[in-house]
């Protein structure tokens, strides 16, 4: 279970996808959550509670690029 997540995070679910990968990108964050398999591109939608229960951990947190690029 995870408690915090943001759009663009890569998460690991309890059950790996049928394609064998267990890394999903959050592509929609709202009342419903949409996650996309990073290997085969399959998109799965579930409600927020289901997502929270089924997500195991965040593998990667999206970072702000602002400081890195220095562009203004
Ligand atoms: Zn897949």
Image: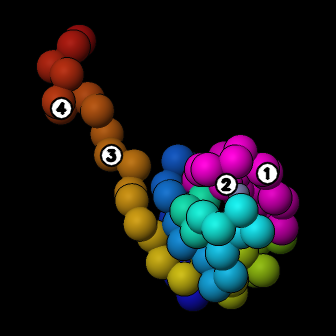
- Give the mark nearer the N terminus: 3 vs 2: 2
**Mark linked to residue 43:** 1
User: Residue at the location (15% across, 19% down)?
Assistant: 70
Q: Are marks 2 and 1 in contact (CB under 8 Å)?
A: yes
For label 1, the crowd category at 10 Å Cα-Cα, with few meaning under 14, some 14 to 19 and many 20 or more, is some
Q: Are the residues tagged 4 and 3 within 8 Å (C-beta)?
A: no
Label 2: few (<14), some or many (≥20) within 10 Å?
A: many
Q: Which residues are magenta?
A: 25-46
Find the distance from the CA under tag 1 to the CA under tag 4: 31 Å
In the rendered image of this protein, does residue 63 appear above or below residue 22?
A: above
Disc 3 crowd, CA 10 A, few/some/many (<14, 14-19, 20+): few
Mark 3 to mark 1: distance in Å? 23 Å
Q: Quadrant of the C terminus?
A: top left
Q: Does mark 2's beta carbon lie closer than 8 Å to ligand 1?
A: yes
Number of numbered discs visible in the structure rendering: 4
The residue sitting at 83% across, 70% down in the picture is 47
- From the viewer's perspective, is the residue at label 1 or at label 4 nearer? 1
Q: Earlier in the sequence, mark 2 or mark 1?
A: 2
What residue would you read off at disc 4?
A: 67
The type of colouring in the image is: rainbow
């Amino acid at each position: 279970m995870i408690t915090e997540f943001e759009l663009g995070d890569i998460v690991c679910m309890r059950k790996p996808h049928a394609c064998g990968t267990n890394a999903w990108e959050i592509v929609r964050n709202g009342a419903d959550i949409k996650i996309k398999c990073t290997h085969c591109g399959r998109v799965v939608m579930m409600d927020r509670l289901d997502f929270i229960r089924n997500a195991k951990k965040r593998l990667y947190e999206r970072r702000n690029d602002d400081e890195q690029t220095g562009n203004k």
